Amino acid sequence: MRGNIVLIIKRQLAWLSVIFALQTPALAQTWPQRPIHLFVSQGAGGGQDSISRYITDKLTGILGQPIIIENRPGAGGIIGTQAAARATPDGYNFAVTSSATMASNPHLVKNLPYDPRADFIPVAMISKPGFLISANPDVPIRSLPELIAYEKASPGRLTVAVDGNRNASGLTAGFLNKAAGINIRLVPYSTPSQGLQDTITGNVNLFISPPGVHLSHIAAGKLRPIAVSGMARESALPDVPSIGETLPGFRIIGWLMISAPKGTPQEPIARMNAAMDRVLKDPAVIAWMQNFGSPSSGAAGSQEELSAFVREEIALWGKMISDVGLEAQ
């Protein structure tokens, strides 16, 4: 009798272990159970914010929970990025990080209140566009070689609207001056829209910003595209050469990536990466992002690839900033 009871108990324990084993994967897939917060270090309506809202709308459909955009603009992206670094790493806080906040700020800002590599885990690449140089149509240049020749013939004659000498477009212009041996005068604006309008009206000659800002004005004949700063030509502007085609080795990209605060569990990171991979490969998303001027990266990327990319970008921006003679302030 006692032997039968022991046998029954063993069988029950065995069944319980099987049931537990079957349920464990299901239990592990409970994330997300509540809304997710995404920190964006730019104000509502900007390019980064627009892309983030479009992407999160798609992610909500996949993950089954709303994603709340936390706009924290200011101080060159420092405010929002610092807030994300300090957010609870529970899988419900993520951030849109960028070349500015993660790669150039470490070389431009003394006592940066976050460490791009120590405080964040890279989750998914969003986009890696270059910056576009456009000209007012009245300026007699149609290509980068013509721009360089025109500027060398009258040094300091050309002006370019930038979002600050130490921000992305200003650094692109400064590095172009250095690489080409020219002296285009930088005219800083507090907002890109002001610089754009002054270029259209002819108060300045050139404008540099992410491609999406230019596209409708190029189509309307108000701007003439000259060159892009990325690794290759932009898919939205296939006939516009890259700067590297004239100046080999020149490469500046304004990338966007989803990151998570250090300590975030691996399951939310893996599931967010998989969801982003689906979004980035969606033909409708690819078309929208191309038309917006910030093409989909095509794949979210592995954590190892993204970590290596961030490391390389920090080194690349550091060299560029050093070459143009800027120091941390």
Image (tube, rainbow, N blue to C red):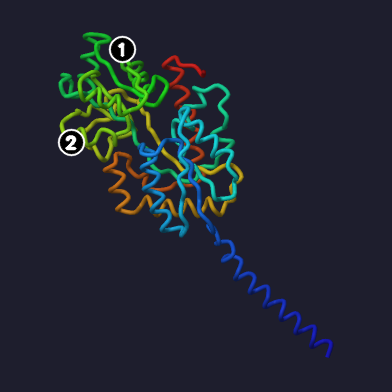
Callout 1: few (<14), some (14-19), or many (20+) C-alpha neighbours within 10 Å? many
Q: SS class of the residue under badge 2?
A: helix
Residue 134 lies, in percent from the top left, at 24, 26
Q: Quick one: label 2 or label 1, which is nearer the N terminus?
A: 1
Residue 161 lies, in percent from the top left, at 30, 21
In the picture as drawn, the residue positioned furthest to the bottom comes out as 1
Q: What is the number of the mark on residue 183?
A: 1
Q: Residue at x 38, y 21 (%)?
A: 164
Of 54 and 171, nearer the camera is 54
Residue assigned mark 2: 219
Q: Residue at x 51, y 39 (%)?
A: 307
In the picture as drawn, the residue positioned furthest to the right comes out as 2
Q: Nearer the viewer, mark 2 or mark 1?
A: 2
Q: Residue at x 49, y 29 (%)?
A: 314
From the viewer's perspective, is residue 135 above or below residue 185? below
Residue 37 lies, in percent from the top left, at 50, 47
Q: Amino acid at mark 1?
A: Asn
Q: SS class of the residue under badge 1?
A: loop
Q: Amino acid at mark 2?
A: Ala
